[in-house]
Image: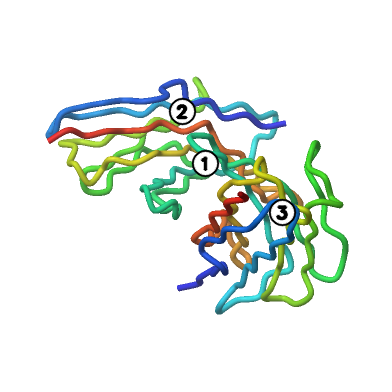
Amino acid sequence: GAVVSQHPSWVICKSGTSVKIECRSLDFQATTMFWYRQFPKQSLMLMATSNEGSKATYEQGVEKDKFLINHASLTLSTLTVTSAHPEDSSFYICSAPPVGGAGQYFGPGTRLTVT
Amino acid sequence: AQKVTQAQTEISVVEKEDVTLDCVYETRDTTYYLFWYKQPPSGELVFLIRRNSFDEQNEISGRYSWNFQKSTSSFNFTITASQVVDSAVYFCALTLMDTGRRALTFGSGTRLQVQP
């Protein structure tokens, strides 16, 4: 079946550096992908909607200049956390809707730790 | 805006007990989908079920069953004869059928611990 992958699965970086997370749809095309963030023992919160060929749409309270999203192809969306700080440490999960279907295919998530 | 409420933060049961996880949702739309996901310690979400707003039939899958009641805006999940492997965080979620807004709105999750 359809699969969404994420890379890396975990990353540790120093405060002030930038980190890029990739989300790929492996056997289907996704004009839209979603990025969620999950802090420890909390729920998944939608950060932004990634749109192929156009600007991402950010949820209220999410800094678009800090969380850069690029959806350059129909199978790849990237999330770059710029100038990361310890409070950005979280579990980042991407998803893509199935073609003509309901719901989402979720990636396995990326655990980011900023020291 | 949509809202999903899972009032039970954490539930602890002993193996073989039955357990019900509650989910209440709010939406002004009449067409929507409801979901349940399991999140084990690895973090990867495991899809359990999808139900559309037109179909109020209850569903059973092995030890799992779901009770959807539009009258009370609830979509509860029951695990029969729980097992240690059922220990995880369970999320209820909702999305509208409107294809322009397909992201999921998640509840806060219920952490289930099944003791041996």
The answer to whether marks 3 and 1 sit on the same chain is yes
> x, y (%) of residue B37?
43, 46
Q: Which labelled disc corresponds to residue B34?
A: 1
Give the residue type at disc 1.
Leu
Q: Chain of mark 1?
A: B
User: Foreground mark, 2 or 1?
Assistant: 2
Give the residue type at disc 2.
Cys
Q: Chain of mark 2?
A: B
> Toward the viewer: B89 or B35?
B89
Residue pointed to by mark 2? B23
Q: What distance separates the C-alpha of mark 3 from that of mark 1?
A: 15 Å
> x, y (%) of residue B84?
19, 42
Quadrant occupied by the N terminus of chain A: bottom left
Horizontal relation, residue B74 to residue A67: left or right: left
Disc 2 residue crowd, few under 14, some 14–19, many 20+, Cα 10 Å: many
Q: What distance separates the C-alpha of mark 2 from that of mark 1?
A: 10 Å
> Toward the viewer: A36 or A74?
A36
Mark 1 residue element = strand
User: Closer to the N terminus: mark 3 or mark 1?
Assistant: 1
Q: Quadrant of residue A100?
A: bottom right
Mark 3 residue element = loop
> Toward the viewer: B76 or A42?
A42
User: Closer to the N terminus: mark 2 or mark 3?
Assistant: 2
> Toward the viewer: A12 or B73?
A12
Q: What distance separates the C-alpha of mark 2 from that of mark 3?
A: 24 Å
The residue sitting at 69% across, 34% down in the picture is B29
User: Closer to the N terminus: mark 2 or mark 1?
Assistant: 2
> x, y (%) of residue B98?
71, 48
Tell me whether the residue at label 2 lies in contact with that at label 1, contact meaning CB atoms closer than 8 angstroms.
yes
Residue pointed to by mark 3? B99
